[in-house]
Structures are given as C-alpha cells and as structure tokens.
Amino acid sequence: MKGKFITDQGRVRNHNEDAGGLFINNANQYLSVIADGMGGHQAGDVASQMATAIIEEKWLESSEINKPEEAETWLKTVILQVNKEIYAKSISQKECKGMGTTVVMSICTSDFITVAHIGDSRCYMINEDGFSQITEDHSLVNELVRSGQITHEDAEHHPRKNVLLKALGTEEIIYPDIRTISWEAGNMILLCSDGLSNKISDLELQSFLETDESIEDTSKNLITLANERGGEDNISLVIVHHELHTKEEGEPTC
C-alpha cells in the first residue's frame, strides 16, 4: 500500500486553514485525514490542526484493526473526542469563538476501508465498479439537490454553496457518517478538501487517478490544475493506492 498527502495554500488566501496527513500505526495500517478549518481570526487553522494532531496521536497509539466494527467504533470514538476538545476551546477562548472544521478520514486495512466524515470534504474511490464519491456533503446545496429543489448543475454556482450543515467543533455533540467498503489490490481512494473538488470535475479526477503516473506526480498535478483554475481556496488531498508488493527497505506496507 502506498499513500501521499499534500496541501497547498492556493493563489488567493493569505494562510492555509487546511490540515491533514497520512499516518501509520504499529500494525502498518494507514489512516488518511483531511480537515478544512473555518472561523475568524485564523481560528480555522486552530480547529483543523487540533483535529489532525489529536487524530494522529490516537492512531499512533492504536493496535491492529481487523474488523469493520472495530474501525467504525474507533473512528466514532475519536471524532467525538476531537469535537469535544475543539468545542471547549471555541467557547473558552474569545479569539476561537465559532471555529470549526470539516473532517474526512479513512482507515485502510488489507481487506477494507472505513470512512468517516463531517462537512463537505470528500472521499472518492476507484475500483472494479468505476469511480464514485463515497461521502455525502453535509451542505445546504447538497440537501437542496437531494430534495430535488435544484440540479447538480445549479449547485455548482449556487450563492450559498459554501454553507455547511455540520462541522466538527461547532456543536457540543456531533456524529459523523461512517461506512465500510471492501477493497483489494489495484483500488485507490482520494480524500480532498473542497479547494480541489470545486475546481476539478469527477470525470477529470477519475482520469488523473487512472493514469500510469506515480501518486506523487498525480497529487502535484491535481494541485497545479486547481491553482491554474483560480486557486481561490486552500487545496489538500490524500491518495492511497492498495498495491500489493514486496516490502522495500524502510518502506511501510500494510
């Protein structure tokens, strides 16, 4: 298994409110995370970085996960804890009032992935069935699409496109959406903030992931294209490729 995390400030923002990473536990299992912060006075930075740091710490302490139920319980427990800590900081420190963050995270084992998310940062998957988005945005426009009030095309240009219905740290208790999907050699997942998904269509994302380029080059090319199309937002992504191969010296596999 191989993975790559990359984040970029973009061409307009004066700081990066995204955070994330690709973390490996003692059993050489991958956890990928993307968090897109929000809040005044750069408090979005605080929320997304807090979320990522706590998640990383808990993952590095974790033992091997063998069953989907274990993965789902771990993700729910950690997200509830992260939410509690961010919420407490937001109400105890004036400069952090109202801060929050999206989060999308995936535990990758050799047989399955378990994905949890809050907000509009996304997870996509490519496998034998094709390319698909496996998370549902917790956003106003997505609810309008689901209820049939607007079309997907309308959603792309809706004036309230950035309004979230759920974000980590904005309520005392909040629950993520969690799902487990089987996966096998050759499959790939992409986690990203809306700085990427707002600039590059699903068909384009699929074409990038289906190239023969390395995931490092693919990641850089996606960032470059999002910036070429305006780069108004921070851009972050993680790609994980389920690739069975012999372990090279110094290279983690799972």
Image (cartoon, grey):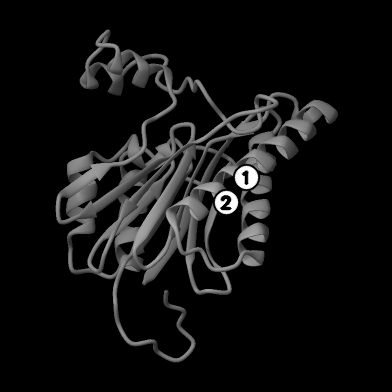
| Residue in view at x 24 percent, y 11 percent | 148
The quadrant of the image that shows the N terminus is bottom left
Q: Do the numbered discs 1 and 2 sit on residues whose CB atoms are within 8 Å?
A: yes
Label 2 belongs to which residue?
A: 74
Question: Residue at horizontal 62%, vertical 45%?
Answer: 77
- Relative vertical location of residue 239 with respect to residue 102 in this rendering, above or below: below
Q: Residue at x 50, y 20 (%)?
A: 165
Locate residue 242 relative to residue 210 in the image: left or right: right
Amino acid residing under circle 2: Trp
Q: How far apart are the two marked residues, 1 and 2, measured between alpha carbons?
A: 5 Å
Instruction: Report the disc number at residue 77.
Output: 1
Q: Is residue 85 visible?
A: yes
Location of residue 92 (image quadrant): top right
The mark found on residue 233 in the picture is: none
In the foreground, 70 or 161: 70
Find residue 127 and report its horizontal and vertical position in percent: 20, 56
Local crowd size for mark 2, using a 10 Å CA cut-off: few (<14), some (14–19), many (≥20): some
* Left or right, 97 with reference to 25: right
Q: Is residue 134 above or below residue 251?
A: above
Q: How many marks?
A: 2
- Judged left or right of residue 75, residue 144 is left
Q: Position of residue 183 (x, y in %)?
A: 28, 59
At label 1, the amino acid type is Thr
x and y percent of residue 234 in the render? 48, 42
Outermost residue, top side: 149
